[in-house]
Structures are given as structure tokens and as C-alpha cells.
Amino acid sequence: MTEPEQASVGQRLPDQARQRKLRLPSWRREALRTTFWVVPTLAIVVAFLLFAITYEVDLAASHHHLTLPWWVRTGSADAGRQVLIAIAAAIITTIGVVFSITILALTLASQQFGPRMMRNFIRDLGNQMTLGIFVGTFVYSVLALGSITGLPSGDFVPHLSITVAEAMLLVDLVVLIYFIHHIAKSIQLPEVIAGIARDLDRAIAAEFPERHSALGQGRHSPSGYTAELVDMLEKPGAEVTARQSGYLQFVGYGQLVEIAEASDAVIRLAHRPGHFVVAHRPLATVWPAGAAKRVAAALEQAHVTGPHRTLTQDPVFAIDQLVEIAIRALSPAVNDTFTALTCIDWLSAGLSEISARVLEEGVYRDRSGHVRLIEFDPSYGRMVDRAFDKVRQAARAMPAVIIRMIDALAHITENTTSDRQRAVLLRQAEMILRGAEEEVPEPHDMDVIRLRFDRLVRAATTLDDRLLASPRHVD
């Protein structure tokens, strides 16, 4: 096999997906989005700019350099002050109400959905825009109020600015109605679950490329390691340790490939985004050992750790959020079976999408085709276990949940592309069945559970037979 062919075999990601993966992701934007101060700050800046424009127009109109349109409000300085004072007072009161409603929603989210769900409400753009629009209106009104001055030649009244403030007040009324509707809708449990599922779909699309293959072509591809690389990996490398503990939130794959190419080195990462990194424990291994010092500095810049997980490069986090809601619903204190069923439905949809994606993405090459970065591979089995293990353990004596889990596994099986994926799903179904046999006393319930399990086995067997009969099947 020639070197270009080896490079082609080693290209475990499609070119477009690899380039997308190597780009610097928007983890900084995600960090800024999960705040309540960024959008209001931008709104304040916009309010200042808008007032600067309207104030200049009012100055020009007061010097008779232009004529304002007929719809611009006119009146005395005292009337203008009264209008702006009323607007500012009403808006600051409304801001207090908006803050109160938001804090109440966050409290309900923390108690009902779990503390990790609070980030979803904080990063909600509707809540941030509502707060920003009200703050911007208040700042604009105060600026316009301060611009009303008495001059020897007569009072200066910013007629256009006052009119714009009144228009902004009307906009705020619409926004307030929207905010009340949005909060009432967003704290409903089905909406929360569906929102997490949408985040999961976006994370899957960002991290894992689609398969462009027919049934039977989803088998694990060769690793693409050259003989030279294998010899290097067998030699002792230098370990690079983590500087601080925390959840790995982001890995700059592009930066690492560039530094490895410049150092003529190979880096093997020990963790994926979402893993917990312990300070002074191995973060990566570098070959040759002499390049470790330079790579260590690059690793510190390319890795971002924090006190919590995020969806950036970590789709499993969304799976864990759905599972958390499900097991809370199954707890004796809540006993909300239907919420757990809803979570299982959305988990099956997410895992069905993952089943059609390429997960074996662990090798990255430089522009010359040399392997420079080896990532801790994602595991289909790990994702399935994270989705079903805790729910299965909490619902061992609940036939309705057991039946829905087996049905969900059957739905996922229909979207699988390899016998290995189906083996993982069947293993999970067998554990569910064994638990039901130990805990479910009603014979009729057990008959239904076994019937659903048999359907799942037949569906998996049919797909395996099609795979074996495929002319593209390779043993």
C-alpha cells in the first residue's frame, strides 16, 4: 500500500467533517451565551447609539436645519419631562417584575428538573432579549430626560427622542406579553424535554458526520496507523499532566494538530470533552518524549476545563440531562411515569440519529497525511448504556416503563448500520428482561414484556441476515 493510500485509509472522518472538527468551536460564544449580562449590555450600547442619532436630529431641528415629520410628538419641556419620567418609572418597575419571574422560573427548574437544568433557562435567548429590551428602553428614556435643558433662547426639547421613547414603550408592552407567554411555556416539562432533545440533535450534527453508506457499510474502519506510527507508539512516550481539575469542556483539535506538526510529534489524548480531569493526572501522551515540553504549553491553551459540563463537543451531556429528568420522575417522591416515558421517547430519537453517524473519528492527520493526533474514541455502547442503565435500574418493577424501553430499543435497532450496534442494543434489552423477570409479579405483564423483547430480537436478526447477504459484507 502506498503512502497516499495509507493516508486515505487513515482518514476516518469525511473531509468536510474533519475540517469542521478541526476548526475552533464556539465555546467562548457558549460561555457568553450562558449569562444574563451580555445581551443587556449590548442593549445598553444600542440605546446609547440610538439616542446619539436622535439627539443629533433634534439638535438639527432646533436650529431649523431640517423639519421633523408630522407624526413626531410636540409639546413643552415640562410635558416632555413628565412623559419620560413616567416611561422610566414604568420600565424600571417592569424590570423588577421580569427579574422576579425569571428567578421564580429558575427556582422551579432547579427543584423540578434538577440543578443542571438551570443553565438551559439562563441561556434561553428569549429571557435574555426581554431583559435587554427593557434595560435599553430605561437607559434611552433617562438619556432623553437628561437632554431637556433650558436655554436663554428657549427650552431645548428633543421631540424625536421623546417620540422614539414612546414607540419603545409600545414595543416593551408587546415584549412583556411575549415574555409571560414564553415563561409559561418554557417551564412545562414536555417543552423542557423537547428543548434538551433539540440540543442533543444539534450536538450530534456538530460532532458526528453522517454516514453516506448503505446497510453493512457501517462497520468499524481500519485505524489507518502506518508501520512507522505503530513502531513509535510502542516506544515509551512522555506524559503531559493536567494543570487543574474540572470537566473538560473543549479541546482545540486544530491547534494540537498544528503544534504536533511543527514539533514532528504525535499526541494521544487521554480524555474527551465531558470527562472529569484530575489535576496532576495524565492528560495526554507525546511521542517523541523530547517534544513533550512544547506540546504541554499547547495543551494548556487548547484544553478548557470548568466546574460543569457543556454541550460543546459533548453530546452525551444532553443524554445525561434527559436521564436525570427520567430518574427524578421515577423516584418515589415524584412518581411521574409519563414524564419518564417522554424522556425515553426522546432518548430513542437521539440514539437513532447517533446510530446513523460515524463515531470512529479518533485519528487526525496534518496536511502531509501524517498522523498527528489520536483522540479517545467515542463509544456507541457507552452512549446506549448512559441512556438506559439508570432508567432501567430505577424502573425494574414498572412494566409500563420496561415495555417503553424495549420498544425504544427496537426503534433504535431499525436505524442501526452494523451488527456491533445491534449487539449493544440486544445486550441492554436482555438486562431489562432479566430485571423484569425478577421484579414484575404479574404474568400478563411479563407476557407483554417477552412479546416486545421477541419482536426486538427478530428485528435485529433480520437486519443481521441482510448484512450477511449483502455483497459488500466483509468478514
Image (cartoon, rainbow, N blue to C red):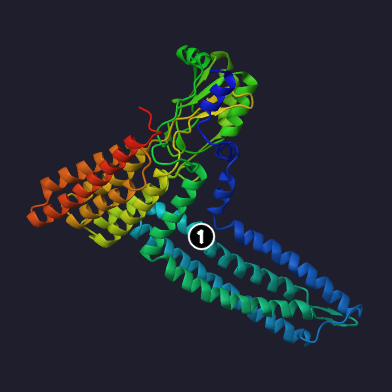
Out of 216 and 71, give the one closest to the viewer: 216
- Note whether 142 is above or below 337 in the view shown: below
The residue tagged with tag 1: helix, strand or loop?
loop
- Note whether 281 is above or below 454 in the view shown: above
**From this viewpoint, is residue 195 visible?**
yes
**Residue underneath mark 1:** 124
Identify the residue at horizontal 51%, vertical 26% (top origin). 9
- Find residue 368 and report its image quarter: top right
Q: Residue 54 at what x, y percent from top left? A: 79, 72
Identify the residue at horizontal 31%, vertical 51% (top origin). 411
Using a 10 Å C-alpha cutoff, classify the residue at mark 1 as few (fewer than 14 neighbours), some (14 to 19) or many (20 or more).
some
Q: Residue 67 at what x, y percent from top left? A: 87, 82
Q: Report the quarter where the C terminus lies.
A: top left
Q: Residue 166 at what x, y percent from top left? A: 68, 80
- Note whether 339 is above or below 228 in the view shown: below
- Note whether 280 is above or below 78 in the view shown: above
Please give left or right for residue 335 compared with residue 133 in the image: left
Q: How many marks?
A: 1
Please give left or right for residue 99 compared with residue 433 in the image: right
Amino acid carrying mark 1 in the image: Asp
- Find residue 25 and report its image quarter: top right
Identify the residue at horizontal 58%, vertical 78% (top origin). 173
Q: Residue 262 at what x, y percent from top left? A: 65, 22
Out of 21 and 61, give the one closest to the viewer: 21
**From this viewpoint, is residue 336 visible?**
no
Out of 317 and 419, give the one closest to the viewer: 419
